[in-house]
Amino acid sequence: MFRDNGLNAAGQRVRNRSLILRSLLLRGPSSRQDLAAATGLTAATISRIVDETIRQGLVQVVESRGPSSGAPRLGRPTTLIDLVPDSVFVGSIYIAGEKAQVGVHDARGEVVAAHRVAVAEPEDAESTLVALAGELRAHARRTGVAERMIRVGATVLGGVDEAGFVVVAHPNWHDVPAADILHRELGIPVAIGRMQHGLVTAEAWLGAGVGVRSVAAVDVSDGIGAAISIDGRVISGFDHREGQLGHFVVPGIDRVCRLCGLRGCLQEQVRDSVFARDARSVLGETAQADDDRTAIDRLYDAARGGDTAARDLVTARARHIGYALALITAIVDPELLVVSGPSIVSGWDLLEPVINEERIRRSPLPHERRTSRVTASSFGADAVLIGTASLALRHFYAEPEVPLVGLEPTPANTSAHDEQRSL
Ligand SMILES: [Zn+2]
């Protein structure tokens, strides 16, 4: 994104601001000396940018350590600088067919407000995007941050190209100019990508993968999908089909896939709705609504309590997820594999040993020592929304320009779309 040579003064200034703000984002409260060590910038440059960003409200002095609290050699107070978390906000929009979520995030990416939204016409891309933009705008206003919302991230279950077109997505979206539609509706820059691209971006840029060269994010929720980041760059497939692991036929699965008709697809064993159904069966519970996932946590509790059938079901799922990780290891062998999904996080203590054992047993040279690692998402149950927001945050922190322009207080197109907001 940035070139080392040929930057003009304005470009250099933006780059230096980016280095300092990102350092504060990752390290929290820092002295000017800490910032110099982290960024390699001179004391004079740091002072100038810190003073400038304090005036603009992006950073603040959070603590002054007097000489008495530090080492004796400190002859004057040490001032710590930190981000102002509510200086700017980003929005997130996650679209998964008939289900969607919108979120409001502070300058650190933390969720300030999040809402699930039912999509009325999931196959109608234009009206869905317009309606979700309206939802986000309404929540930004309700939260009182509309004028400080400076970017929006959006993610879909499908493939997105560099120009912000949704090439293909569930259900039946093809070549949808989604970034343009959202930008038209919201008036601020929009970054859009595949849901798993958001997950891996958040981990590599803000989470467990900071400082790690190769990171894979694997999500297990409505299906199973992965994305890979190498040296900060998320891999995109030529036909935008990368990372879709759900329809690999896996030994030991005997079910017929509801989507593709093959026998033994991975997702027919691991996705949440199937796992919840199997859990109810093991627990002897009567059938609930198909999207009732609460049985999963009851199954985990039974497994922790020593119930053999419960433990066997959890182990089977963990083995299948471990197999998926072995597939990724065989092709890319990333240093860090991060697994996300609400039902992954809540059962991680049970799942992790089996997942790790199986991914090693199934991947190349299983008996050789290795240092690659598996961990649960850094962001718990908020992983998808924070991942979505991270696409926008990364955009802002790369070029933290001023003045900041947020959502317009009174958009010209409000009335035309009001009726669609109710979804
Ligand atoms: Zn299938």
Image: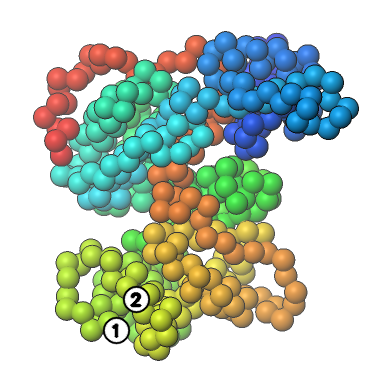
Residue farthest bottom in this picture:
308
Which residue sits at x=44%, y=68%? 347
Q: Position of residue 137 (x, y in %)?
A: 28, 27
Q: Can the viewer see residue 315?
A: yes
- In the rendered view, would you say 403 is above or below 35? above
Real-space CA distance between mark 1 and mark 2, rounded to the nearest whole angstrom: 8 Å
In the image: residue 81, left or right of residue 165? right
Which residue sits at x=44%, y=50%? 383
In the image: residue 6, left or right of residue 135? right
Of the pair 63 and 27, the residue shown nearer to us: 63
Which quadrant holds the C terminus? top left
Amino acid at pointer 1: Val
Amino acid at pointer 2: Leu
Which quadrant holds the N terminus? top right
Residue farthest front in this picture:
68
Which residue sits at x=37%, y=75%? 301
Instruction: Write down the residue under mark 2.
Output: 299
Q: Secondary structure at mark 1?
A: helix
Q: Are marks 1 and 2 in contact (CB under 8 Å)?
A: yes
- In the rendered view, would you say 365 is above or below 84? below
- In the rendered view, would you say 418 is above or below 332? above
In the figure, residue 336 lies in which quadrant? bottom right
In the figure, residue 117 lies in which quadrant? top left
Q: Position of residue 253 (x, y in %)?
A: 39, 82
Instruction: Write down the residue under mark 1.
Output: 282
